[in-house]
Amino acid sequence: MAQSPVVPEPLEAGQLAAPSRQSCLLASVVIPACNESRVIGRLLGQLVRSAGQDDFEIVVVANGCTDDTVGVAESFGPRVRVLSLGVASKREALAAGDRVAGVFPRVYVDADVEIGAGDVRVLAAALGCPGVLAVAPRLELVMAGAPWPVRWYWDVWSRLPEVRQGLFGRGVVAVSEAGYRRIAALPPVFADDLAMSLAFSAAERAVVDDARVRVHPPRTFGDLMRIRIRAAAGVAQVEQTAGAPPSTARTRPSDLVAIVAGEPFLAPRVGLFVLVAGLVRWRAGRAHRAGRGARWLRDESSRRAAVQAGAAPAEAGRHRPADRAGRVPLAGIDFDRLSEAEVVEHVISASMGGQGGWVATPNVDICRIAQRDPAARALVASASLRVPDGMPLVWAARLSGDRLPERVSGSSLIFSLTAAAVTSGRSVYLLGGAPGVPELAAAELSRLYPGVKVVGTAAPPVGFDNDAERMAAVRDHLVATVPDIVYVGLGFPKQERVIAGLAAVLPGTWFIACGAAIPFAARVLPRAPAWMRQTGLEWVFRLISEPRRLSRRYLIDDAPYAARLIASCTAQRIRHPSRHSNSRR
């Protein structure tokens, strides 16, 4: 039965009450929420599903809500304590949460981010280091679906030294009891995370790489401007408020020069960043002169996207089938129009609903083979999800008038899906690679994602799939361990054939055809830098890394095929220009 929301006694302005203690808990999590019914279920689902009864308490403080934030939070049962305030004030919400929270460390979490119980545990443990009073997790920006100007801006912003080293902009800050006393003395400002970060010296605060928070930035340029104007006003307010810590959050020209010097391909993005920053400063100054000053301007586009992606709490843990009408025919394969984040969400949601399946990640080489080999094409067509692992495929789809959101590779899914597996309590298995490599990959994933449940690894010998006894041994081990997710890295088409033989005996398991992802995860095979992967140049890096193995495939087979495919799609676009407007989401 859902608990009734608690309405705490009124607090004096700026008051932060001293908490009591419950030594059996690891930490207290306080979540202020104002009209967050569209996204708070996503956060609470991740915290509650993978947290033990004695890990930490969760306090949600709904403030000034006119939607169903309280009802959504209550739906998670007694694990979540729900308070309700009539006034929309984040500071008062934090104060009310502190009033009832029982233990330290104290973890403050914005309702619109994603963080799992394992990450909270890591943050709590980090506060045990001598001299550390405040910590925040590593930032991961979810950019799928955002237009290029928005992506370019955040690409630069996330590289700024103050952003990398500060605690702000992450939506999560954890403090020890001594750290709590420090921030309790701060004057009221609405840039609360910036003020918290500045209240601690570099030696007293830390960004914990082993903990991760997923932040959903604005999906429109208008909302990007809105929240950056809010941020600029917040910095100005901190600088002008008596008793606030001195601000060092402004971007320096030397910071931007250093970014371009280190990654020259970012020069156009830095140029856009400078233009946006100048426009933001001008509009913030005009608002200040008009007497509008510091106001809470809110991004709604990421919250709308959360509902479209299925983050509504009523659907938490329930499998929603992929949109079959949202498929893009290309090179004889029907690709699902899904971003990487949507693939991860689909797999986790289906797994939690007891349904398995498998994900194919065709690249240019696979498409070339499938187009001339009906058996290979039928094998790929049998996958539950088919997503493009290659920028030429994304470009070709766009040129034809269709649109695929982004490249989704097995070498990226092994990281993003494993991170989601931790927060949702799913187990993983690694199948493929040279002897010892799956074990190295398991160790590296465990280091990156503390709490991941790797229930097994296997590096079967060459030809095992044609040996009934050896194939049976692999199958029996999988059946004995019953993993939720299996990464199968054996190369095309062997991995797809093996998956077809294993899926029937493990109907609740998801298999990911991931190619070289396991040696990438093990760090025994170098992976191309992010900028090469994003610009379609990863093949150059891999060709340099493995010239003898890949020269013929890339230069003689795949390059001419990719050129023909792009030319064909361009011609199709010219012949049928109306498809462009009809096929976009």
Image (cartoon, helix red, strand yellow):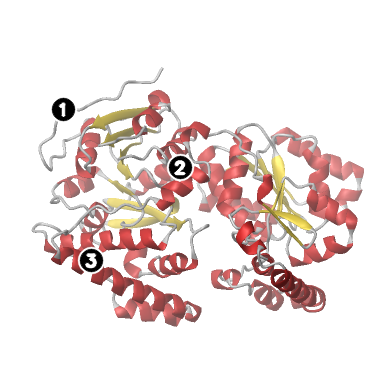
Secondary element at image label 3: helix
The label shown at residue 459 is none
- Mark 3 or mark 2, which is nearer to you? 3
When the figure is inspected, residue 331 is found, relative to residue 538, above or below; the finding is above
Q: Are marks 1 and 3 in contact (CB under 8 Å)?
A: no
Of 28 and 171, the residue lying toward us: 171
Residue labelled with disc 1: 9
Name the spot of residue 453 as percent of width and height, x first.
58, 41
The outermost residue toward the top is 1
Q: Residues within 10 Å of mark 3 (few under 14, many from 20)?
A: many
Q: Which residue is mark 2?
A: 116
On the image, which quarter does residue 368 sit in? bottom right
In the image, residue 528 sits, relative to residue 307, either above or below, namely below
Q: Residue at x 43, y 82 (%)?
A: 261
- Name the amino acid type tagged 2: Gly
Q: Which residue is mark 3?
A: 284
